[in-house]
Image (spheres, rainbow, N blue to C red):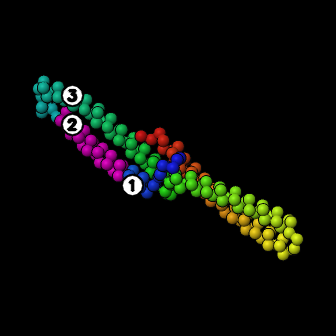
Amino acid sequence: MNTNSYLNPQSMRQQCSDAIADLSRDNNIYREISKRIDEFVGDSRFKSRGVNALKAHLSDYQFIIRAMIAANEYDIYDFNVLMNSVGYETLVGSDILYGKETSRGLKQENEQRAYEYEQKAADALLPIQEIYYKQKANNYRYMADLANQMFNRYVEKGNEYHRIDNETRNLF
C-alpha cells in the first residue's frame, strides 16, 4: 500500500455487478448465435458443395463462440470473487499511512510525558504534588493507550488492504 492506494468497496461491487451483467448478456447472445448455427448446420434441406463448406466453416466459429463463453464465465467467476473480497470499508492509503504515523507519534509523545510526570511525582516534596503529578501521568498513559488503539486500528486497515490485494492480485 502507498499514498495513492484507494479502495471503495461500494463502487467496486457496483462495477463488478455491472460487468457480470454485461458478460452474462453477451453469453446469452453467444448461446443464441450458437443455437442458430447448430440449427443451420443440422438442417438437411440445404445441400450443395458450397453449403457443406459453409457448414464446415461455421463449425470453426462454434469453437470460437464456446471459447468466448468460457472466457466470459471465467471472468464472471473472478468478478464474483472480487466482489466478495473487497470488504465494506473504504480504504485510502494516504489516510491509513498518515494515521499510523500520527498515532505512533502521539503514543510516543504521551508515553514520554507520562514518564516525565512519574518522575516529578517521585521527586515531589508535598503529598498533594505527588497526587497531582501521578494523576497527570495517568492521564498521559491513558492518552498513550488511546493513541495505541488508533495505531492498531490503522494497522488493521492496512492489513485489510493487503489481504484484499493478495486475494485478488491473480484475478483476470
Closer to the N terminus: mark 3 or mark 2?
Answer: 2
Which quadrant: the C terminus? top left
Residue occupying image coordinates x 26% and y 44%? 29
Q: CA distance from mark 3 to mark 2?
A: 11 Å
Point out the tag, 3 or 1, that comes first from the N-terminus.
1
The secondary structure type at the circle numbered 2 is: helix
Q: Residue at x 81, y 64 (%)?
A: 118
What residue does disc 2 label? 37
Q: Mark 3 — residue?
A: 57
Q: CA distance from mark 3 to mark 1?
A: 40 Å
The residue labelled by disc 1 is 14
Dot 1: what SS?
helix
Is 161 or 70 nearer to us in this picture? 161
Q: Is 9 located above or below residue 32 in the figure?
A: below
Tell me residue 19's x, y (percent): 35, 49
- Asked if the magenta segment contains residue 31, the reply would be yes
Determine which quarter of the picture holds residue 32: top left
